[in-house]
Image: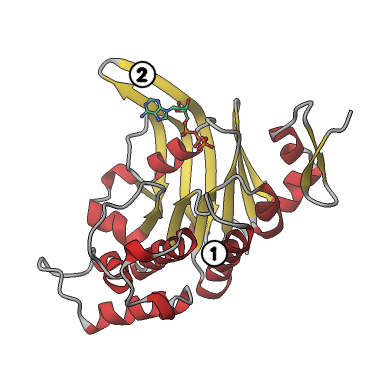
Amino acid sequence: MKENATNIILKTNDLNIGYQHKKQVFCVASHLNASLARGKFVCLLGKNGIGKSTLLRTLTKVQPKLGGQIQIDNKELETLSTIELAKKMSLVLTEKIPENNLTVYELIALGRQPYTNWIGTLSDEDKKYVDLAIQQTHIEGIANKKYTELSDGQLQKVMISRALAQNTTLIILDEPTAHLDIQNKVEIYKLLKTLCENYQKTILISSHEIHLALQLADQLWLMNEKGIITGNTKSLIEDGSVSNLFASNLVTFDANSKQFVINTN
Ligand SMILES: Nc1ncnc2c1ncn2[C@@H]1O[C@H](COP(=O)(O)OP(=O)(O)OP(=O)(O)O)[C@@H](O)[C@H]1O
């Protein structure tokens, strides 16, 4: 699919991100220009502390931008109400969810909040989306468990399922595979890729799983001290952008194996 204005779901224009405490402004990154095309699986990579979480939190209106523009479906992010935004994008952040007695099914059903009435009763349509989300993430076997009894890998699938129940085209996840073993990391990555391919979701994740991202992402957002470089994975490997991202005297990028390898001398 060619990238024209209609298949861009999210776009930033000279975006500045960071934190403001009283009158003090701490700018994390500035003049960020990037866009997300529909149906793509996109990974945001960069060193610790470079600003990946700050960027995702700004794109999702969890924290205010410092300057520039963010457009979702050609509308300025600030002009969208909370409900409008919740029907366009769902979020899976790293913050721990407060402990309560909910079952997995009930937790996923919370994803229907933008659509339910004020007492939160689930309609047949809501139940249909919850069931579909459970099926898409292959977690039928744990749907009746208390979510507090889940392993980290199971919980991550449940949080993705909740985002799917929200039925948005765009899903944004901050480090969805942190703390998971290799089996679960691969499972989550493949699940996200399948959701883009089979259900036309657009998914943006931040990650430190460079090897998995390089094998499975359609596109990359590479964040460095100068800003952000975006493009399809193959071309960013070929033009050296991936290699430059983590360049150091400790590791070297091997384009054949798509891995950083430890320098031995
Ligand atoms: N609440 C805050 N107030 C002020 N500065 C913050 C706050 N949260 C994060 N920062 C700073 O913003 C910068 C970017 O942090 P951020 O968490 O976005 O990086 P990151 O790329 O997601 O890092 P990591 O890969 O380690 O998760 C860091 O210098 C961090 O110390």
Left/right placement of residue 52 relative to residue 250 reads left
Could you classify mark 1 by the number of other residues whose Cα lies within 10 Å: few (under 14), some (14-19), or many (20 or more)? many
Q: What residue type is labelled 2?
A: Val
Q: Of marks 2 and 1, which one's residue comes earlier in the chain?
A: 2
Quarter of the image for the C terminus: give it: top right
Which residue appears at 54% of the width and 30% of the height?
50
In which image quadrant can residue 167 be found? bottom left
Seen from the viewer's position, the closer of residues 245 and 210 is 210
Left/right placement of residue 133 relative to residue 37 reads left
User: What kind of element bears circle 2?
Assistant: strand
| Outermost residue to the top | 23
Query: Looking at mark 2, is its residue's CB closer than 8 Å to ligand 1?
Result: no
Left/right placement of residue 153 relative to residue 189 reads left
Q: How many labels does the image show?
A: 2
The residue tagged 1 is 192
The label number, if any, that marks residue 25 in the structure image: 2
In which image quadrant can residue 189 be found? bottom right
